[in-house]
Image (cartoon, grey):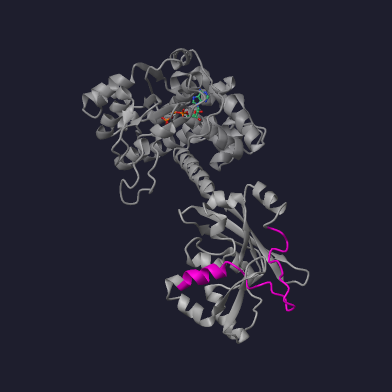
C-alpha cells in the first residue's frame, strides 16, 4: 500500500492511482487518524453503487493529503483558517469567504458565506470542490480555476435558489512558490441586480424626458420671464390658480410661451418639488401615444419591454403632466384621459388592473377647441373638464412692448453662451419691434442666436437682418403696369428701395446690389424727375 500525498475527489482519484501505480490508499482525517482504506475497485464501483458512493464520499471529506514522507501528519489547515482567532476574524466580515487548500479541498467558510448562500459549513468543509459542483451545490468553482491558472479569477456563480453571487478567488502562495490556499471572497449581487433594475427604471425616465426634450426644471428667475401689460394679467391669474387643483387650459399661437407658462404654474404650485413632464400629443401615432401616456403591462405586445413600461402618468406621479396640443389627442385616448380627469385612474396598455393617477393636469392648444368640439373632433365633456380655468397668451405682434426687452434679454443670454459681445443698433431694434413675428417668441430667440453667432461686427445693424423683417415697399403691392421697359424699371426701383431701407446708405445699398453708388444715385434722380 502506498500513501498518496494528494487530495482526492471522485474525478481525481483514479488518475492518481494510475500515476502512483497503486491500487489502495489510506484515508486520514484532519487529526491524522486513519479512517479507512480506499481501493481502486471501491472508487470504480462507487460510481455505480449508491451505498459505496456514500462511503467513498464520506472518505473524501477527509484528506489523504498531508502525509509527509516521514509519516508525520501535516495539518492541512496549517495556516489556521479554520481555527481561532482567524475564524472569528473571517466571521466578522460582511462578504462571504471560502478557503480551499492547494488541491481544492474546502478548508473553511465564514458565517457570511453561510448567510449569503444558505449552504452550511458541514456540507462543504472537507469536500473537494469538484464534488460540490457535481452535487449541484454550486454552479462552477473559482478555486479550481485559480489552482489551474495560478492567478486570481472572478466569476458569477448561481447557487441553489438561483441567487447570483460574484466570487473572486485569489491564490495564496507558499515560500517555495507553490499554491498553499485559495481564498475566495463572495458577494451577493442579487441586491446589486435589484439596484441595477432601479437604475434601468431611472434611465427609462431619463429617455422619456429626452424624447420629449423636457429640460430639467430650472428655477424661473424673474428676468427670465418678460411680461407686459398684455400678459401680466395672464401670469397673475396663473399664479392665483396654481395653488388650487383646478384644471387649466392654455391657449395661444405656437411659440407664445404656453410651455413656459405651464412650468411657471407648476413652480408656483404645491407640487413644485415633484416632476414636471411634458407630452406633445402630435408627436406620436395613436398606439405609441397611448403607450407613452399610460404605459404598458409586461408582455403587452410583441416587442414590448419584458418588464413593461411606465407611462408619463406614472413618471409624473406627485407632479404635473403638461399635455401640449391636446386638440390633436385621438378620440379613443380622450375617453381614457377623461377617466383620469374624473376618477384619477387608468389602465396601462394590456393591463388588467387600474393604476392610481396622482398628477396635476395642464393642457394647451393653439387650436380653437370649441370649434374642434363643434366638428366632433374633441369630446365636449373632456373639454369642460380640462378647461376649468382657461388662460390665453396673445401673439407677440399684440405684445409689442415685450419685443425690445426680449431682444435684449436673449442677446445678453447668447452673448454669454457663445462668449461674444454683440449689441443691437437702434435701427435694427426699430425694424425688429415692428416685425410681425409669426413664429412668436421662439422665432425671436432663434433669430437672436443666429445673429449673435453670425454677425460680422459687434453691433448688429440692419444689414445683418433677414429679408422677412423688412417691411415690403408700397410699390410691391401695386399691380405692375405699362410696357415691358416700364415694368422692369418699376421692379428695379422696388429692389433699390428695399436695399436702401435695409442698408441705410446709398453706398451700402449699391454695394449690396453690385452696382456703383453713382449709378444708384443717377437712377434715384431719374425717378425724381419722372414723378415731378
Ligand atoms: N414671457 C417670456 N419671456 C421670456 N421668454 C419666453 C417667454 N415666453 C416664452 N419664452 C420662451 O420662448 C420659447 C417658446 O416658448 P414655449 O415653448 O413656452 O412656447 P409654446 O407656446 O409652448 O410653443 P408650442 O406651442 O410650439 O409648443 C421658449 O424658449 C420660452 O422659454
Q: Is residue 149 left or right of residue 373?
A: right
On whether residue 375 falls in the magenta region, the answer is no
- Residue 372 shows in the view: yes
Residue at 24% over, 22% down: 380
Residue at 48% over, 69% down: 54
Q: Looking at the image, is 484 positioned above or below residue 379? A: below
Q: Looking at the image, is 285 positioned above or below residue 158? A: above
Which residues make up the magenta segment?
Answer: 52-81
Residue at 57% over, 77% down: 37
x then y, percent, for residue 145: 60, 68
Q: Is residue 31 left or right of residue 470?
A: right
Q: Nearer the viewer, residue 293 or 62?
A: 62
- Residue 493 shows in the view: no
Q: Is residue 423 left or right of residue 288?
A: right
x then y, percent, for residue 239: 47, 15
Q: Nearer the viewer, residue 488 or 55?
A: 55
Residue at 42% over, 20% down: 393
Q: Looking at the image, is 398 positioned above or below residue 165? A: above
Amino acid at each position: 500500500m502506498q500513501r498518496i500525498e494528494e487530495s482526492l475527489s471522485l474525478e481525481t482519484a483514479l488518475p492518481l492511482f494510475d500515476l502512483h501505480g497503486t491500487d489502495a490508499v489510506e484515508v486520514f482525517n484532519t487529526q491524522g487518524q486513519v479512517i479507512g482504506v480506499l481501493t481502486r475497485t471501491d472508487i470504480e464501483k462507487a460510481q455505480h453503487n449508491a451505498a459505496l458512493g456514500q462511503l467513498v464520499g464520506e472518505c473524501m471529506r477527509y484528506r489523504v493529503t498531508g502525509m509527509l514522507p516521514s509519516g508525520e501528519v501535516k495539518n492541512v489547515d496549517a495556516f489556521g483558517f479554520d481555527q481561532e482567532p482567524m475564524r472569528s476574524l473571517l466571521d466578522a466580515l460582511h462578504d462571504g469567504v471560502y478557503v480551499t487548500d492547494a488541491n481544492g479541498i474546502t478548508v473553511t467558510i465564514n458565517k457570511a458565506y453561510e448567510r449569503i448562500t444558505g449552504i452550511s459549513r458541514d456540507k462543504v468543509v472537507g469536500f473537494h470542490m469538484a464534488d460540490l459542483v457535481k452535487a449541484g451545490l454550486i454552479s462552477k468553482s473559482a478555486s479550481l480555476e485559480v489552482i489551474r491558472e495560478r492567478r486570481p479569477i472572478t466569476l458569477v456563480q448561481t447557487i441553489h435558489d438561483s441567487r447570483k453571487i460574484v466570487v473572486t478567488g485569489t491564490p495564496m502562495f507558499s515560500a517555495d512558490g507553490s499554491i498553499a490556499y485559495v481564498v475566495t471572497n463572495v458577494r451577493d449581487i442579487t441586491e446589486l441586480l435589484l439596484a441595477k433594475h432601479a437604475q434601468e427604471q431611472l434611465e427609462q425616465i431619463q429617455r422619456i424626458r429626452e424624447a420629449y426634450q423636457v429640460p430639467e426644471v430650472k428655477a424661473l428667475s424673474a428676468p427670465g420671464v418678460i411680461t407686459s401689460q398684455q400678459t401680466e394679467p395672464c401670469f397673475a391669474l396663473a399664479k392665483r390658480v396654481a395653488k388650487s387643483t383646478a384644471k387649466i387650459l392654455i391657449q395661444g399661437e405656437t411659440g407664445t410661451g404656453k410651455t413656459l407658462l405651464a412650468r411657471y404654474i407648476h413652480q408656483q404650485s404645491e407640487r413644485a418639488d415633484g416632476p414636471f413632464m411634458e407630452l406633445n400629443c402630435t408627436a406620436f401615432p395613436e398606439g405609441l401615444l397611448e403607450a407613452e401616456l399610460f404605459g404598458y403591462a409586461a408582455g403587452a405586445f410583441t416587442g414590448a419591454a419584458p418588464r413593461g413600461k411606465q407611462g408619463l402618468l406614472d413618471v409624473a406621479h406627485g407632479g404635473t403632466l403638461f399635455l401640449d396640443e391636446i386638440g390633436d389627442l385621438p378620440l379613443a385616448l380622450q375617453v381614457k384621459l377623461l377617466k383620469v380627469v374624473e376618477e384619477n385612474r387608468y389602465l396601462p396598455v394590456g393591463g388588467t388592473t387600474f393604476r392610481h393617477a396622482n398628477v396635476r393636469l395642464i393642457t394647451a392648444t393653439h387650436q380653437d377647441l370649441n370649434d374642434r368640439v363643434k366638428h366632433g373632433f374633441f369630446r365636449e365633456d373632456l373639454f369642460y373638464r380640462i378647461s376649468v380655468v382657461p388662460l390665453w397668451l396673445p401673439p407677440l405682434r399684440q405684445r409689442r412692448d415685450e419685443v425690445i426687452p426680449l431682444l435684449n434679454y436673449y442677446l445678453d443670454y447668447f452673448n454669454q453662451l457663445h462668449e461674444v459681445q454683440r449689441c443691437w443698433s437702434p435701427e435694427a431694434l426699430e425694424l425688429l419691434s415692428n416685425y410681425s413675428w409669426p413664429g412668436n417668441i421662439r422665432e425671436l430667440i432663434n433669430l437672436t442666436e443666429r445673429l449673435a453667432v453670425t454677425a460680422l461686427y459687434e453691433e448688429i445693424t440692419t444689414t445683418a437682418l433677414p429679408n422677412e423683417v423688412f417691411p415690403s415697399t408700397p410699390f410691391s403691392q401695386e399691380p405692375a403696369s405699362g410696357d415691358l421697359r416700364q415694368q422692369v424699371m418699376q421692379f428695379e426701383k422696388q429692389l433699390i428701395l428695399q436695399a436702401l431701407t435695409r442698408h441705410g446708405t446709398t453706398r451700402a445699398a449699391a454695394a449690396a446690389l453690385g452696382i456703383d453708388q453713382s449709378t444708384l444715385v443717377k437712377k434715384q434722380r431719374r425717378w425724381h424727375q419722372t414723378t415731378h
